[in-house]
Amino acid sequence: MDSSACNYHFTEDADPTFLHDMYFGPYAEEKFICDAIEFPIRAILNCYKQGLIKGDTMIDFSYAGNIYQILPIYKCFKDIIILEAYDSCMKDTENWLHGGEHSLDWSHAARIMEELQGTSADWKEMENDLRSRVRYVSKCILENENPTDPIVLPKADCLVNLYLLATISKDLDHYSRNVKKMSTMLNKGACMIIIGAFNASYYIMNGKKHHILCFTETDLRKVLSDNGLRVAHMEVCERTSCNKTVTFDHGFVVCAVKESCD
């Protein structure tokens, strides 16, 4: 795939409603939901069971207004900060936070989590509890000296990045710089959870191909090590979906602990 044929994000906004309907919502392809939602939730639950996720403050910096990735662990934290890379996602997340009309529905993700845990919960109660813990929703531009200017964020104990890094990074060096910038948001000993895909190239949004950085597990481990992050847990899952609107070979979830000081 010629990368020049793809659009890079930061050149145009994302469309969270389209992405939800196409990839992450309750009517997306069943096997893709298994790859993109069930697998990450299961892996994050495993990180929690190993005692890797703890503290007071969590940052979520993910793609397209998604929140399902934090459902398994949000109760661990008193304070949650949601960062968004795009104006449309900021608007969508703020609408969800205030219970606005046409908010994206994540009840299907909650059901998946309940099935994995063997428990039951009231989705509306869970959603309202999550909302009550959100302290900030902020635009984040990693290239800026203070990515959340004018807000100065407190250091966090956990940062979750779902499917965003590979869409905003033009090459592996750029990916590494973005990881380093995100690590500055964390306390020493905190964990960074990255959810992504190996050997990807593009996905389709509104009829256009959009870039996903292609890299391997070896590349990822080197990037994390180079930036003072120790891999504490990693899970890799072979793709099962035949969805031709997105390309990748394997999904991954990695939990890396920050060992270096800024």
Image (tube, grey):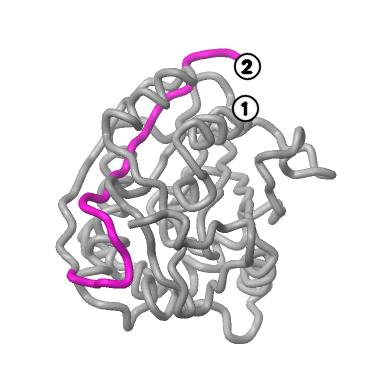
* Image quarter of the C terminus: top right
Q: How far, Cα to Cα, is label 2 from label 1?
A: 6 Å
Identify the residue position indicated by label 1 in the image.
Answer: 184
Q: Was residue 255 drawn as part of the magenta stretch in this picture? A: yes
Report the front residue among 21 and 204: 204
On the image, numbered disc 2 is attached to which residue? Answer: 262
Badge 1, how many Cα within 10 Å: few under 14, some, many 20+? some
Residue 21 in picture, x, y percent from top left:
42, 80
210 magenta-colored? no
Task: Kindly identify the residue that appears in the image at 54 percent across and 57 percent down.
Answer: 8
Q: Are marks 2 and 1 in contact (CB under 8 Å)?
A: yes
Secondary structure under tag 2 reads loop
Magenta stretch?
242-262
- Of labels 2 and 1, earlier in sequence is 1
Q: Amino acid at mark 1?
A: Thr
- Looking at the picture, does residue 27 appear above or below residue 150? below
Residue 119 visible in image: yes
The percent coordinates of residue 57 (x first, y second) are 59, 39
Q: Residues within 10 Å of mark 2 (few under 14, many from 20)?
A: some
* 150 with respect to 242 (left or right): right
Residue at image point 32% right, 72% down: 245
**Displayed quadrant of residue 209:** bottom left
